[in-house]
Structure formats: C-alpha cells, structure tokens
C-alpha cells in the first residue's frame, strides 16, 4: 500500500553515517547538504518552496532503510556551492532501529 503525502516529496540517497545522525535521538544532524548545481536546482524546483518532505534512502538492497523528514528551510550558499536543507520533524521511518542506530533485522 503506497503512502500518500499531502505535500511534495523529494527522494535522495544518503550514506549510512549521515542517515544514522539524522535519525538519532537526540538528533546529531539537522542540516542535509547537497551540491549547488543544475541537477539539484531542478529537483528542488519540482517540489517548490518549503515546507516539503525529504525521503532519504540508505542503500540499494531490500529492505532499504528509509526515512521521511520535513524540510523547513532551504538555503543556497554560493560561496561554498552547497544547498542546505534544514530538517524538521521525522515523519516516518522504515527498516531502521533508531535506538541502536542500525538496520532492523
């Protein structure tokens, strides 16, 4: 059964260490960084202005750990050529043990 979102959702892959830091309780990472380039600008244009959801996937082999997090603010830093996605509430987590910070067995 597919989940329905009332706001647009952007999907991105993320490395395990950053995925774990975003889902840690308490959270150790509240900003996700992406390169400031045409690829990410076009993806952000599709979801529009914040708030929107960011679906983070960690890995390729099922079951893939995933989380949906609300993006509250987007800042483009031309000096460092990065996009800052300021993360808010964690909306959904699948196949991940937040307490032990590892995939569910």
Image (spheres, rainbow, N blue to C red):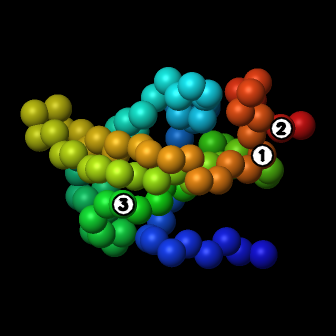
From the viewer's perspective, is the residue at label 3 or at label 1 nearer? 3
Task: Report the number of numbered marks.
Answer: 3
Residue 77, labelled with which disc?
none
What residue is disc 1 on? Answer: 95
Residue 74, relative to residue 21: is it above or below?
A: below
What residue is disc 3 on? Answer: 51
Quadrant the C terminus occupies: top right
**Residue 45: x %, y % from top left:** 27, 68
Alpha carbons under labels 2 and 1: distance apart: 5 Å
> Which of the pair 27/20 is nearer the observer?
27
Task: Tell me whether the residue at label 2 lies in contact with that at label 1, contact meaning CB atoms closer than 8 angstroms.
Answer: yes
Q: Earlier in the sequence, mark 3 or mark 1?
A: 3
Image point (59%, 53%), residue name: 91
Alpha carbons under labels 2 and 3: distance apart: 29 Å
**Residue 84: x %, y % from top left:** 29, 41
In which quarter of the view is residue 98 placed?
top right
Quadrant the N terminus occupies: bottom right
| Classed neighbour count for the residue bearing mark 1: other residues with Cα under 10 Å, few (<14), some (14–19), many (≥20) | some
Task: Give the structural element (helix, strand or loop) at label 3.
Answer: loop
Q: Earlier in the sequence, mark 2 or mark 1?
A: 1
In which quarter of the view is residue 30 placed?
top left
Image point (53%, 34%), residue name: 22
Task: Give the structural element (helix, strand or loop) at label 1.
Answer: loop
Q: Is residue 72 left or right of residue 7?
A: left
Residue 16, relative to residue 83: is it above or below?
A: above
Q: Earlier in the sequence, mark 2 or mark 3?
A: 3
Alpha carbons under labels 3 and 1: distance apart: 25 Å
Q: Please say whether residue 38 is visible from this viewpoint.
A: yes
What residue is disc 2 on? Answer: 104
Residue at the far right in the pictured view = 105
Q: Please say whether residue 64 is visible from this viewpoint.
A: no
């Amino acid at each position: 059964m597919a989940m329905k979102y009332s706001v647009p959702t952007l999907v991105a892959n993320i490395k395990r260490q950053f995925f774990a830091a975003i889902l840690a309780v308490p959270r150790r990472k509240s900003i996700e960084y992406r390169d400031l380039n045409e690829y990410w600008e076009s993806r952000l244009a599709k979801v529009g202005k914040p708030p929107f959801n960011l679906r983070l996937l960690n890995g390729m082999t099922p079951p893939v750990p995933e989380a949906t997090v609300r993006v509250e603010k987007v800042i483009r830093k031309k000096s460092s050529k990065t996009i800052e996605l300021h993360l808010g509430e964690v909306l959904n987590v699948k196949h991940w043990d937040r307490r032990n910070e590892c995939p569910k067995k």
